[in-house]
Amino acid sequence: MECKFWNGIEKYSSALDQLFSYLTWRNNHAVLITFSRNKDCSDVLKKAKESTLTHRSIVLNSLKESQLGEFVTLHRNPNASEKTLEVYHLIFDLYYQ
């Protein structure tokens, strides 16, 4: 599991890389929790999906919509190319005026 504040598409991709660096061959699931202070959390969710869909480890057409602020993707495990890894992306809206 990795927790981050939203800092843009490039940083989101880096957060995925950081998350994957913790994993071992045994891992089948991972969670990336992102906190957004932005006014429009829907835009953050859209950009997080865009970043994930262009990540080098993504399994094509694997994005599954979940509840509002969540989605799941399938990735090739960087420590075991024959295995895949389910990543749960949770976006939390912390915006306040």
Image (spheres, rainbow, N blue to C red):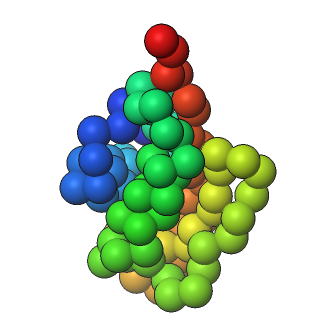
Residue depicted at 77% across the width and 51% down the height: 67
Residue 55 in sight here = yes
Total tally of numbered discs in the picture? 0
Q: Residue 31 location, x and y as percent? A: 55, 46
The reply, left or right, for residue 88 in relation to residue 17 is right
**In the image, farthest residue toward the right:** 67
Asked if residue 85 is positioned above or below residue 61 in the image, the reply reads: above
Up/down of 56 relative to 73, above or below: below
Comparing 38 with 31, the one in front is 38
Q: Is 81 in front, or is 13?
A: 13
- Which residue is pictured at 52% across the width and 40% down the height? 41
Q: Residue furthest front?
A: 97
Find residue 2 and report its image quarter.
Answer: top left
Q: Give the image location of residue 9, x and y in percent.
A: 29, 55
Relative image position of residue 39 (x, y in whole percent): 46, 31
Q: Is residue 53 left or right of residue 11?
A: right
In-image side of 54 versus 97 (left or right): left
**Is residue 27 in view from this perspective?**
no
Q: Nearer the viewer, residue 41 or 88?
A: 41
- Is 53 left or right of 88, judged from the image as shown? left
State the residue at coordinates (65%, 50%). 70
Q: Position of residue 48 (x, y in %)?
A: 44, 56
Is residue 89 positioned above or below 26 on the image? above
- Farthest residue to the top: give it: 97
